[in-house]
């Protein structure tokens, strides 16, 4: 065997010191790799200088070893040097002892990774299932709410439409009707005679208002008959046959007080209104009365303010005159007479 090459005192005088490394729980003694200026290296085990073509590196620890220290045959050593065995890696004896532990750790990590991936996949599937259930539940609730709202709206709209149709039908039925208030009522036992007297009174009123031959389909008193004639007479409902005569009767009814005499002067003829129309008129009347009261209060407040301003003005003028008169009476000499002071 060739003796080691001496590269100087710095190398030969320095003792070989082992490098302690820990791999997989096992202690290994390694020597530092020494390189010469010409590019030669020392074998990790025997520390002999080797050329590049006569050493191989461990695939795990990357340290260099000569052929005798590898324990390989010349053919196998040459194959590893020629890189013809790309699928095979050479490992030193120390690394071979630690590889099972590293492989076991690697397998454990792979198993943990696989379990983690399965767990993540399971969680993703569960989340998707939860999202699907939540979405389905929301859609069901929304559909149920939509159906409820639609049903409620249909019912309410249907009720409104029915009420409006009934109101319009009621108004059409009353288009030829009029109501007469304060018309004297007969209290005969024979109702036919009472009706004839009402017809006579209505024809008399219409004739005096310029409406000849008033065409009446029927007429009747509203409400239960009152036994006492001193009470206010019941309203009389009249159903006419002609729309023009109804319009003329309503328009000319304001002249009843001027063209009729006696008890017929108190008669009042108005349209036959539905409950909705009467309520609307009542609300409008009450609103007008409220606004009128408010305006009256404002006018009264303004008048009161103006009155107080006038009183204060008169009071201030009187006070100033009194004060000025007193000052003048004190400052004037005795020779000034009282008539002159009064003129001032």
Image (spheres, helix red, strand yellow):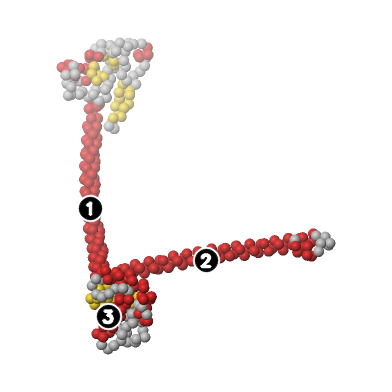
N-terminal of the pair, mark 2 or mark 3, is 3
Q: Quadrant of residue 262?
A: bottom left
Q: Secondary structure at mark 3?
A: helix
Q: Position of residue 109 (x, y in %)?
A: 24, 36
Q: Residues within 10 Å of mark 3 (few under 14, many from 20)?
A: some
> Where does label 1 land, which residue?
139
Q: CA distance from mark 2 to mark 1?
A: 65 Å
Q: Position of residue 232 (x, y in %)?
A: 36, 82
Quarter of the picture holding the C terminus:
bottom right
Q: Which mark is residue 199?
A: 3
Which label sits in the foreground, 3 or 1? Answer: 3
Q: Secondary structure at mark 1?
A: helix
In the rendered view, would you say 74 is above or below 133? above
Q: Position of residue 134 (x, y in %)?
A: 24, 51
> Where does label 2 land, which residue?
300
Q: CA distance from mark 3 to mark 1?
A: 70 Å
Residue occupying image coordinates x 21% and y 17%: 67
């Amino acid at each position: 065997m060739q003796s080691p090459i001496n590269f100087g005192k710095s190398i030969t005088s320095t003792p070989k010191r082992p490098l302690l490394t820990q791999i997989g729980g096992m202690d290994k003694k390694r020597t530092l790799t020494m390189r010469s200026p010409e590019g030669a290296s020392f074998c990790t085990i025997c520390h002999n200088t080797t050329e590049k073509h006569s050493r191989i590196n461990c695939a795990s620890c990357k340290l260099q070893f000569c052929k005798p220290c590898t324990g390989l045959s010349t053919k196998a050593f040459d194959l590893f040097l020629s890189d013809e065995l790309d699928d095979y890696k050479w490992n030193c004896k120390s690394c071979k002892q630690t590889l099972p532990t590293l492989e076991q750790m690697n397998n454990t990590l792979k198993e943990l990774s696989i379990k983690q991936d399965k767990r993540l996949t399971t969680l993703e599937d569960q989340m998707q299932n939860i999202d699907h259930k939540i979405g389905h539940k929301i859609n069901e609730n929304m559909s149920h709410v939509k159906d409820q709202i639609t049903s409620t709206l249909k019912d309410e709209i249907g009720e409104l439409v029915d009420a409006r149709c009934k109101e319009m039908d009621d108004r059409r039925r009353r288009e030829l009707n009029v109501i007469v208030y304060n018309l004297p009522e007969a209290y005969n036992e024979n109702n036919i005679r009472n009706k004839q007297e009402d017809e006579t009174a209505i024809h008399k009123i219409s004739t005096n208002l310029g409406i000849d031959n008033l065409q009446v389909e029927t007429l009747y008193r509203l409400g239960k008959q009152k036994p006492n004639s001193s009470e206010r007479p019941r309203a009389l409902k009249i159903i006419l046959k002609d729309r023009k005569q109804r319009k003329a009767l309503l328009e000319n009814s304001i002249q009843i007080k001027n063209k009729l005499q006696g008890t017929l002067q108190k008669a009042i003829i108005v349209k036959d209104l539905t409950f909705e129309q009467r309520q609307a008129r009542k609300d409008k009347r009450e609103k007008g009365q409220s606004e009128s009261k408010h305006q009256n209060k404002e006018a009264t407040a303004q008048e009161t303010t103006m009155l107080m301003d006038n009183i204060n003005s008169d009071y201030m003028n009187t006070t100033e005159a009194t004060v000025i008169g007193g000052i003048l009476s004190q400052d004037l000499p005795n020779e000034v007479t009282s008539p002159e002071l009064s003129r001032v």
